[in-house]
């Protein structure tokens, strides 16, 4: 168990008898020494006039302030305060201390602190400080409580038995174990350790942050124990795995004459939760009921944080049924019931049971923003986008009634999923613009993601420019968009701008840049990024970076370097194995791809659908048809993987490359799923290679039906006709393209010079500044080829 505090512990000397003169300007991390002895007689304050000599009205008001805060309301106290102000007695320290006690008891902490700050230094009292320290600690405002404690020391007042319990509670909230140990020494020196409240509060600090043995020793030294003391020790035993000892302490409590209450059982449940054993915590909950006790709000508040993480769906349903059956037996506030249903609903979402989660969600009366966001996230994870939008619209309606704006988290969750629902995405964009959230970093990043998925680069760029504080996610999003669109030059330009503007790339930045290198086979840039990653410390720390680098080397044809990267990955995952298999297949090393596949299985890794796509693709490209068919047949029998269109496309491609066009077509007709453009495209390419005009027309017809505006399919069919010198059919294809409004995307070539310059060339390109010199050199090369006997194949009628 770690004993390190959450913030640097204050260096407090409990043995000092001369506190500094001022503390209110000092931070919590630099407190003064604690004075355990009262100030000397030489510092005695001048005597105050007795209130009995004051006007009768003041004496009456002072007597009224003596009443308990349960009797005197906050409004009545404020009226007394106003009357004292009119009478000129509001500055009396004794009356101010009583007002502070009243305000603190009713939670009006700002008013109480203002009164305390107005009291002269010589009029400060224990009542004023203790009342406000207690109020701060009870509201979990630990830092203000400790600040006030330090002010108390600076004023010359020694802490007493009413001060230390709440100071120790604040130490427990902040994890300041070192300060707790120093207060321990002060309690021993002043004799306050014998006070059961001080000792119990100290034990709570030891239970949470000290070694278990130290907590046991402290418990043994507390002679006067109350229920809180025993409960703290029960929690200590349970959170360290000693459940039998924790339950046995219930009998020890009875032997000492104490009555066991629900709070003792709650302590055991809390210890099980801290130990991380939710199953045991639920078992203890059952014992609470079997022992005749009613679980209360504190019981379920202890369990609530762990309920959404229940790993067993059956166990979750048991808890749900338990809560329904025993609802009347549990002493729970209505608000806590809502929180319980919210936690169980979140657990159902964790398991993807959105129908159950929705039923519970509808029964929650006070829906929090966190619960609604969880519902949105759950629907999105299950692909139920319309249902997620329904929750968002409910949130927007509720916020509109309260004149509030939706949270940025809600917009950030749902915007990236608006790619298919552009209208809804534009509505949310308009909402963000009206409420001034468009320039927010997280919202802007989500908007960019939405437009990127719709390939709307203009809108994404505009949003990118409006983000006032761009973070690394902003840059990663815009770079990844251009990588997805294969605009590699723009992607690299933005990547370099990110670095020049002082934004340090993270593992996802390098991954996107390496993906760009993979698409364009930029070997030099891949090597440069490799060196940059090593210097930045990302290379050996993140699998995503190493996998992307391996893929880049493989796509650049450097299979040896790819294998070196693979061997250097310390913690390989399935993606690592899939990538190296794909690299080997891409680089025409099918034997190595098959070898890595068998190594993967031998080392205990289970292949997935992507593994078989890489393996079948390697067999297809290498002409290993029999091997490919064997792996295709065994992928279901050995690993339970049902083939999808990608796997079928690999087999069609393999059959086509082997010249078995008819068999490939029959394979397509026998498929249990509908063929897509990849499958028909593979068949059409094979028909062109082997000159099968009949099936080429069949494949082309299906392709054009699937995507009439894809120019590549029209061009491929035209090339098939051109290879067969069927120029009339070529003209008809060209005319059909024109009638359909399909424009051929021009192809281009590029030359990379020393990794510094990239020159692109279109067909009959006249735009390059050195085109005259280029064509002069090309003519010279052509003449030299002809002199060597080369005869070019020229089809003047080919329109493409």
Image (cartoon, helix red, strand yellow):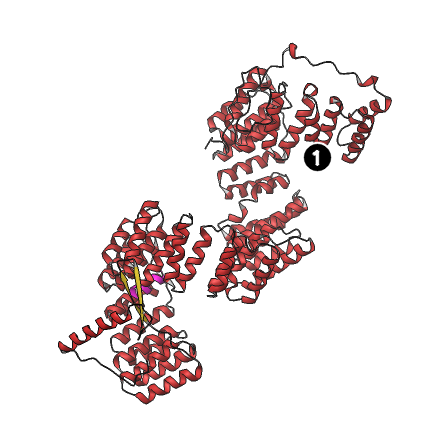
The dominant secondary structure in magenta is helix
Q: Is residue 61 above or below residue 329?
A: above
- Regarding residue 321, the answer to whether it shows in the image is no
Q: Which residue is mark 1?
A: 108
Instruction: Kindly identify the residue that appears in the image at 31 percent across and 81 percent down.
Output: 719
Give 412 or 171, whichever is nearer the viewer.
Answer: 412
Q: Tell me residue 592's x, y (percent).
A: 23, 60
Span colored in magenta = 607-616
Taking depth in this image into account, of 78 and 297 the one nearest to the observer is 78
Height in image: 252 above or below 546?
above
Q: Is residue 659 magenta?
A: no
Quarter of the N terminus within the rendering: top left
Residue lying at 57% horizontally and 14% vertically, measured from the top left: 17
Q: Is residue 538 above or below residue 791?
A: above
**Residue 415 image position (x, y, % from top left):** 53, 59
Camera-side residue of 76 and 327 = 76
């Amino acid at each position: 168990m770690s004993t390190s505090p959450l913030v640097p512990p204050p260096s407090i000397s409990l043995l000092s008898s001369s506190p500094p003169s001022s503390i209110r300007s000092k931070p919590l991390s630099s407190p003064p020494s604690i004075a355990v002895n009262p100030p000397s007689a030489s510092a005695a304050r001048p005597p105050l006039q007795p209130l009995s000599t004051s006007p009768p009205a003041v004496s009456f008001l002072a007597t009224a302030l003596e009443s308990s805060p349960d009797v005197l309301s906050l409004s009545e106290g404020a009226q007394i305060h106003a009357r004292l102000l009119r009478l000129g007695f509001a500055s009396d320290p004794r009356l101010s201390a009583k007002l502070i006690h009243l305000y603190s008891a009713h939670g009006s902490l700002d008013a109480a602190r203002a009164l305390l700050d107005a009291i002269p230094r010589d009029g400060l009292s224990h009542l004023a400080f203790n009342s406000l320290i207690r109020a701060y600690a009870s509201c979990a405002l630990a830092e203000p409580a400790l600040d006030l404690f330090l002010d108390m020391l600076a004023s010359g007042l020694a802490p007493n038995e009413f001060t230390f319990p709440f100071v120790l509670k604040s130490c427990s909230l902040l994890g300041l174990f070192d300060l707790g140990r120093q207060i321990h020494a002060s309690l021993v020196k002043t004799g306050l350790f014998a006070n059961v409240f001080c000792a119990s509060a100290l034990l709570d600090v030891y239970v949470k942050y000290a070694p278990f043995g130290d907590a046991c020793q402290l418990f043994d030294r507390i002679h006067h124990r109350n229920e809180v003391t025993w409960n703290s020790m029960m929690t200590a035993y349970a959170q360290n795995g000693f459940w039998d000892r924790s339950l046995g302490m219930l009998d020890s409590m009875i032997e000492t004459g104490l009555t066991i209450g629900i709070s003792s059982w709650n302590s055991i449940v809390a210890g099980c939760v801290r130990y991380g054993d939710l199953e045991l915590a639920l078992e203890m909950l059952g014992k609470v009921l079997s022992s005749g006790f009613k679980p209360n709000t504190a019981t379920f508040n202890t369990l609530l944080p762990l309920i959404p993480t229940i790993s067993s769906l059956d166990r979750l349903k048991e808890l749900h049924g338990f809560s329904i059956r025993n609802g009347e037996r549990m002493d729970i506030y209505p608000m806590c019931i809502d929180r319980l249903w919210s936690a169980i609903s979140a657990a159902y979402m964790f398991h993807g049971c959105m129908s159950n989660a929705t039923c519970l969600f509808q029964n929650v009366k006070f829906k929090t923003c966190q619960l609604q966001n969880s519902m949105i996230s759950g629907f999105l994870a299950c692909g139920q986008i319309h249902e997620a939008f329904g929750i968002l619209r409910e949130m927007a309606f509720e916020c509109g009634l309260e004149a509030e704006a939706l949270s940025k988290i809600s917009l950030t969750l749902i915007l990236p999923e608006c790619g298919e629902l552009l209208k809804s995405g534009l509505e949310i964009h308009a909402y963000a613009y009206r409420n001034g959230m468009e320039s927010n970093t997280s919202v802007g990043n989500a908007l960019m993601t939405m437009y990127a998925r719709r390939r709307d680069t203009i809108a994404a760029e505009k949003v990118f420019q409006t983000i006032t504080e761009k973070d690394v996610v902003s840059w990663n999003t815009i770079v990844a968009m251009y990588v997805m669109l294969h605009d590699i030059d723009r992607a690299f330009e933005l990547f370099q701008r990110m670095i020049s503007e002082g934004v340090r790339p993270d593992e996802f930045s390098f991954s996107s840049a390496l993906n760009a290198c993979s698409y364009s086979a930029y070997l030099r840039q891949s090597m440069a990024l490799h060196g940059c990653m090593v210097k930045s410390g990302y290379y050996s720390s993140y699998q995503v970076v190493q996998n992307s680098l391996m893929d880049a080397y493989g796509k650049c044809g450097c299979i040896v370097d790819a294998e070196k990267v693979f061997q250097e990955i310390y913690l390989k995952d399935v993606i690592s194995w899939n990538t190296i298999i794909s690299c080997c297949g891409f680089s025409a090393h099918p034997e190595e791809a098959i070898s890595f596949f068998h190594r993967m299985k031998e080392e205990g890794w289970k292949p997935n659908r992507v593994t078989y796509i890489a393996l079948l693709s390697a067999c297809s490209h290498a002409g290993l048809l029999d091997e490919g068919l064997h792996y295709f047949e065994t992928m279901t029998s050995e690993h339970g993987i049902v083939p999808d269109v990608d796997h079928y496309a690999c087999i069609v491609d393999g059959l086509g490359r082997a010249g078995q066009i008819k068999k490939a077509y029959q394979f397509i007709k026998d498929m249990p799923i509908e063929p897509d453009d990849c499958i028909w495209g593979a068949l059409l390419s094979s028909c062109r290679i082997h000159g099968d005009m009949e099936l080429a027309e069949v494949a082309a017809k299906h392709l054009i039906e699937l995507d009439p505006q894809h120019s590549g399919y029209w061009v491929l069919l035209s090339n098939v006709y051109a290879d067969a010198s069927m120029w009339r059919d070529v003209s008809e294809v060209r005319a059909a393209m024109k009638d359909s409004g399909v424009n051929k995307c021009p192809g281009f070539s590029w030359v990379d010079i020393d990794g510094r310059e990239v020159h692109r060339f279109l067909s009959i390109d006249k735009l390059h500044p050195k085109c005259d010199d280029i064509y002069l050199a090309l003519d010279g090369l052509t003449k030299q080829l002809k002199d060597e006997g080369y005869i070019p194949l020229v089809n003047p009628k080919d329109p493409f």
